[in-house]
Image (spheres, rainbow, N blue to C red):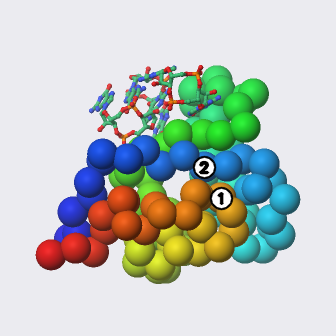
Amino acid sequence: SSAVTSSTKIVLNLESLGSLPADEAGPLARYASTIQAQRHDYNGKVLSIRAEDLKSLAIIYDMSPDELTTRLIEWGVLSPGMESVVGFGGP
Ligand code: C2E
Ligand code: C2E
Ligand code: C2E
C-alpha cells in the first residue's frame, strides 16, 4: 500500500462542497457531515480531516487516492498543490 505523508493537513472547503451536485459529491458530503457530527463541529467553513479518511473516501469512490485528490481539486474542495504534498502513490 502507498505511504501517506502527514506533513500537510487535508482541509476540505465546505462551501465548495455544499455547492456541488449531490450525485457526485454526495458520499463525500455525507462523510464530512458525519465527522462534523462526531466532533460537534458545525460552524466551520473548512473541515480538517485525517489522512486515513482520504484513503477510505478513495475506496468509496472506487479511485486511487491520487485520482480522488485530483478530483477534489477540480471540484474546488481541496486547494491546488495537494497532489504533490499529500504524497500518495510514491515509491
Ligand atoms: P489550522 O489547523 O491551520 O486552522 C486554521 C483555521 O482554519 C482555524 O482557526 C479554523 O478557523 C479553521 N479550521 C481548520 N480546520 C477546521 C475544522 O476542522 N473545523 C473548523 N470549524 N474550523 C477549522 P482557529 O480555530 O483560530 O485555529 C487556529 C490554529 O489553532 C489551528 O490552525 C490549529 O493549529 C490550532 N487549533 C485550533 N483548534 C485546534 C484543535 O482542536 N486541535 C488542534 N490540534 N489544533 C487546533
Ligand atoms: P477518537 O478517535 O477516539 O478521538 C477522541 C478524541 O481525541 C477526539 O475527540 C479529539 O479530541 C482527539 N483526537 C483524536 N485524533 C485527533 C487528531 O488527529 N487531531 C486532533 N486535533 N484531535 C484528535 P472528538 O474530536 O470529539 O472526536 C470524537 C470521535 O469522533 C473520535 O474519537 C473519532 O471516533 C471520531 N472522529 C472525529 N473526527 C474524525 C475524523 O476526522 N476522522 C475519523 N475517522 N473519525 C473522527
Ligand atoms: P491526521 O490524522 O491526518 O489528522 C489531520 C487533522 O485532522 C488533524 O490535525 C485535525 O485537525 C483533524 N482531526 C483528525 N482527527 C480528528 C479528531 O478526532 N477530532 C478533531 N477535532 N480533529 C481531528 P492535527 O490535530 O494538527 O494533527 C496532526 C496529526 O497528528 C494527525 O494527522 C495525526 O497523525 C496526529 N495526531 C494528532 N492528535 C492525535 C491523536 O489524538 N491520536 C493519534 N493517533 N494521532 C494524533
Residue 56 visible in the shown view:
no
Q: Amino acid at mark 1?
A: Val
Q: Position of residue 87 (x, y in %)?
A: 30, 64
Q: Identify the residue under disc 1.
A: 77
The CA span between labels 1 and 2 is 5 Å
Q: Position of residue 69 (x, y in %)?
A: 50, 68
Does any atom of ligand 1 lie closer than 8 Å to the CB of label 1?
Answer: no
In the rendered view, would you say 64 is above or below 32? below
At 30% from the left and 47% from the top, the residue drawn is 6
Work out whether residue 48 or residue 32 is closer to the camera in this orientation and state it: 48
Q: Identify the residue under disc 2.
A: 12
**Is there CB contact under 8 Å for labels 1 and 2?**
yes
Q: Position of residue 78 (x, y in %)?
A: 59, 58
Mark 1 is surrounded, within 10 Å at the Cα level, by few (under 14), some (14 to 19) or many (20 or more) other residues, namely many
Work out whether residue 31 or residue 5 is closer to the camera in this orientation and state it: 5
At 54% from the left and 46% from the top, the residue drawn is 11
